[in-house]
Amino acid sequence: MTSHAALPSWAALAPMAMFVVTALVLFLYDAISPDSENSELLAGISVAGALVSLGLTGWYLVAGTGQPRRNGAISLFGDSLVVDGMSLFFTALIASVVILVVLASYDYLKDEPHQAEYYSLVLLAATGMAMMSTANSLATAFISLELASLPSYALVAFLKHNKGSVEAGLKYFLIGALSSAVFAYGISLVYAASGALQLDAVATALESPEAAGVLGLGVIMVVGGFAFKTASVPFHFWAPEAYEGAPSPISGFLSSASKAAGFVLAFRVFTVAFGGDAVLESVDWVVAFQVLAVVTMTVGNFAAVKQEKVKRMLAYSSIGHAGYVLIALAALTDSANSAFVLGSGMAHLLVYGFMNTGAFMFIALTEYWGIGRRFEDFNGLATKAPFACAAMSIFLFSLAGLPLGGGFFSKFYLLMASINGGVALLAVALVVNSALSLYYYSRVVKAMWIEDPADGDFEIESYPVGLYAAIAIAAVVTVLLVPGFGPVAETAQMAAEMLV
Amino acid sequence: MVMIEALLAVTLAAAGVVFLAPNRYAAKLATALSLIPLVGSLYMWSEFTASGNALLEEGAVAFESVFTWLQLGQYELQWYVGLDGVSLPLLVLTTVLTTLALISSWTPIDERQSQFYGLMLLMEVALLGVFTALDFFLWFVFWEGVLIPMYFLIGIWGGPRRKYAAVKFLVYTNVASLVMFIGLFALIFGLGDSLSTLALPDIAQAVRGGGLGGFAFFDAAALKTFAFVLMFAGFAVKVPVVPFHTWLPDAHVEAPTPVSVILAGVLLKMGTYALLRFNFTMLADVARSNANIIAAFGVLSVIYGAMLALSQRDLKRIVAYSSISSMGYVILGLVAFTPHSFGGATFQMISHGLISGLMFMAVGVIYNATHTRMVGDMSGMADRMPWTVGIFLAAAFGYMGLPLMSGFAAEVLVFIGSFQSTVIAGAPVYTMVAMFGIVVVAGYLLWAMQRTLFGAYSLETDYDVTPAPFHEVAPLVVLLLLVILLGVAPDIAYGMIQDATEPLLGGGVA
């Protein structure tokens, strides 16, 4: 027995609490010296907070907190929050992404005002996301979703003097508000059918559903709410605009951490609350997710092919990846391998958290240097910045599923998952879309390494430390996930086993 | 044994060192470092005592090394490497050709050297991995890993249309890999619970042992055919077999000479090696019952490739198309299912690796001096570059199958084997049509040489042609000596090849 056995059960929420505390410390500092331009300190506090949070989660994961080999899941606040393997896995993922985002933002926001607010908004959003991973009731699910979303709207529009940023924020907010309303309405219908909000209670009540029609409509609307947060069809329209207009570190944050948070909530709600046979009889959400998965990955990838701007291409590819992860819900046809299916989706989100965030950090770097956004603007970049370009190539090849990074394995696990689930169409769509994706990812690689530099040669004047650190960390982790994918997949599957 | 791990690790480390080295030292440094895997592989050859096929027999794997990598559902994925009589000669071919190709890069590669040489060594790692990996997953990692350095090597240092050629190569061969991947996984799923690892020997023995069940809407027999067709199509792109060959001329013509050497010398062999390991080992019965169709593909490649070569003006294109023709013999040899045809086909992989490498290098040396490769643009080169031309001539005769050179041994073995084939209906007809390919080869090579090498000296470009420097000729000499050595004493490699291919003729598990 290690010493933390004596800790009270609410200590299990410490990683999440760390985000809030750090955000409050930042506010406090800003209140004391509002005109300070000490961005080193602000970024330092944020990174330290996220690091402590990551360390705590890692410790809990290793020590077995909230997992079967200790005392099982830890329920808090009348079962409305739960700390288990799943929540810890995703909190670790979110904390890692926050570290990368803050490191990159330190350089990216060099001369912007209101940095304290920026960092605290990032940490508040992270709090919401971490809470999404622990939410065990539809009420906390909704609250945490809003807590993650509201700071995100502000962050997208953070560059106040940039029209694109403001427009993106507005669009994100409007679609977000709409989908929140749909989500809340869905919850109310589920409540009407089950009389409960706590997920296990919903599941018990739904063993003999009374108002099947109302329930069905409710479940479909809840699906819609998740589609927004994970940038899946049909609520994906905000994603290209928001990712393109937002400051690049925030684009990485939203497309990695926020997406992961949306998925963990969906995993929990659908497997715990709607996992019963009776629910599936009245509304077969597995089939709904199958359709959504295929459509989402196809729409994302085909749209990405046609893009002329790199950041926008990454935004569409992010939609495509949401489609891949949806396999984790769409292939839940057979309870015998549900843990494997769900675990594969989780593992892909983790790998994606690094390779995709890394790619957006590279975009942030190019924006920092004032390089344009089109593919041609990247021409010959590798001669100027070979290390950053090598890292970007690793991210892109890994995103495409070549065995240079962990993306190869996680896609392969998803392929196995869809075949084990007996949904061959998903497997085919995954393979075809992956093959297609290599085409547009390799366009960036080609521009950087193969094309000759454009006229009007620009000079790179400085090599920002924070951005480079973020890119290097993301690249190293992406590569290390090739030999180290085993433990990640095992952890994910163990976590998933607790739910299904 | 950790020999293979050491080989891969040293080469990988060498690549890393070269990437970080300054441009002006990169060439010599990379060449020197590439001697380590070369010597290592030769040492392994001298220590090699195993006999038998690695996929079919226990204890046939030399330098074996296994440990668990990760658990994928019911399957244990392993780091599993080892060698047998088929893969060892290919391993040595890779290390030899890489070192020589690195030397032949000294002249033509004049920018971003450290990246070029680093990528060449990185490709060597992937190639060594392809020939040593015995776990499907690990093998696939290396197989795909070859694409990435190749893409850059063609795309950055290639000719005028290099960007198009690089993307075409990447997308074309990646799609082929996925097709093949689906094929093999159909087999794995068909084997169901009886399989607990993805080691190639386990898969091969389970399939040959009749453990295959149905999967999805296929019964066992249909599943076998389905898997065979997908894998054949996937590998046929790599070989390449007509009509899957269209990426090759583009890639070859645009690639710089040393990259062409590796491309023709080793990369194409990945395709035939994989065909041998997968289609003709695991699914031998499907190959047997469809032998005529496959043999037709082989003969078609021989004739069509040769015809295409006949109509080219670019010396590199001529060699590229004639590679398609030569690989057709390998297909014919594999599908004939006789001891000599299997052995000859494998021997042809080695022999063609050396000869085509030699031809590309010789064309490269001439190009370095003249800056043209067009047949009509030059004549009488023999007066100005006697050594180079002499070796080029010898290599061309090797290509035509001159006795006492390795090409002769390989082709004769293939023809004897396929002539005797009982699997192909009307085998003698196929063999004779394929032999006609040699006549065409002789025709186009003699004609091209007549026009470029002999006659009065003239050159369309404004360069002063002088004899090539020593470091350009030396690799040619080494390769030529190897070609002659294997022609005079084919048993150096043929013995172990026969040991390893013989078991493939049996029906079930050996």
Image (cartoon, coloured by chain):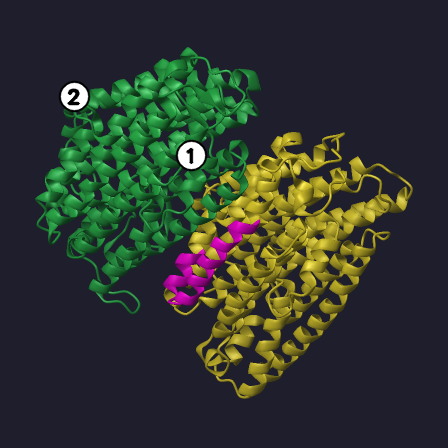
Chain colours: A yellow, B green
* Residue at 26% over, 67% down: B218
In the image, is B136 to the left or to the right of A320?
left
* Residue B52 visible in image: no
Residue A351 % position (x, y): 53, 48
| Residue named by callout 1 | B314
* Residue at 29% over, 55% down: B188
Alpha-carbon neighbours of circle 1 within 10 Å: few (<14), some, or many (≥20)? Answer: some
In the image, is A129 to the left or to the right of B123?
right
Q: Which mark is residue A262?
A: none
Is B49 located above or below residue A75 in the figure?
Answer: above
* Residue at 65% over, 66% down: A228
Residue B42 % position (x, y): 27, 20
Is B333 located above or below residue A262 in the figure?
Answer: above
| Residue named by callout 2 | B488
Is B187 located above or below residue A405 in the figure?
Answer: below
User: Label 1, label 2: how many angstroms apart (C-alpha)?
Assistant: 32 Å
Q: Main secondary structure of the magenta part?
A: helix
In magenta stretch: residue B370:
no
Type of the residue with mark 1: Asp
Task: Read off the chain for label 2.
Answer: B
Type of the residue with mark 2: Val
Residue B180 % position (x, y): 34, 52
Residue B95 % position (x, y): 34, 25
Secondary structure of the residue carrying numbered label 2: helix
Alpha-carbon neighbours of circle 2 within 10 Å: few (<14), some, or many (≥20)? Answer: some
